[in-house]
Amino acid sequence: MEWKNTPITAQIQIIKKSADYNPTNGLPEGTLLSGAVFEIYDKANNVVDTIKSDSRGLAVSRPLPLGRYTIKEVKAPDNYGVNDTVLNAYLEHKGQILTFEVTNKSLTTGVAITKTGPKEVMGGQPVRYVFSGIANTSNVRLDSFYWRYTLPAEVILDQVVTGTYNYPGNYKIVYRINGGEYAAETLPAGS
């Protein structure tokens, strides 16, 4: 006689929503989001399932044996940041569907820059502009950024000093003189 054991299973469902208005894609708070990827871990910290939210914002696990699981978001929908909250799931009875609602905050980028210097100068007089307070105002890390500043055609650029920064790196200055070709110089911080 052969007897086949069938594990008693339950499921995990995640409803993925926008936590706020997203200025990049125009989606309002509470919009159901597709494309979020979650990993489900067993109590030995092995990945037992990877699920992705669909067009209805729903991510559904395969049937899982009863037990304790942890869930981590590993990829957020486009234009949103990953929600770092670790979810704990306890599947306790046959056919149970344990549902979580998880929100993602919109990614925003921005840079703050303060420029000081004279508003007017006499012809032939040297001018000094200082750019300070350069800061990342984003809610994400920026690996690079740029800003553009245009001087009147009558101005002769004599010297550029990058100063010191709190993060080591190279700074590229691109310039064009009187409608000519663009030229570029890459300088280490403090040049």
Image: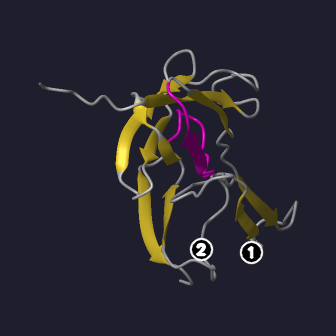
Task: Give left or right: position of 123 versus 67.
Answer: right
118 vs 131, nearest the viewer:
131
Q: CA distance from mark 2 to mark 1?
A: 9 Å
The kind of secondary structure the magenta stretch mainly shows is: loop
Which quarter of the picture shows residue 155?
bottom right
- List the residue tagged with mark 2: 158
Q: Which residues are magenta?
A: 73-94
The x, y position of residue 121, in whole percent, is: 84, 65
Which structural element holds mark 2?
A: loop
Is residue 82 visible to us here? no
Would you name the residue on which mark 1 appears? Answer: 126
For the residue carrying disc 1, how many other residues have a C-alpha within 10 Å: few (<14), some (14-19), or many (20+)?
Answer: few
Q: Does 148 sit left or right of 183 as displayed?
A: right
Within the image, what quadrant is residue 158 found in?
A: bottom right
Please state which amino acid type lies under the numbered disc 1. Pro
Q: How many marks?
A: 2
128 or 65: nearer the viewer: 65
Q: Is residue 144 magenta?
A: no
Is there CB contact under 8 Å for labels 2 and 1? yes
Q: Residue furthest right?
A: 119
Between 10 and 75, the one lying in front of the other is 10
Instruction: Kindly give the residue lying farthest to the top in the view shown.
Output: 56
The residue at 42%/50% (across/down) is: 42
Identify whether 122 is placed above or below 93.
below
Residue at the (53%, 80%) spot, across then down: 189
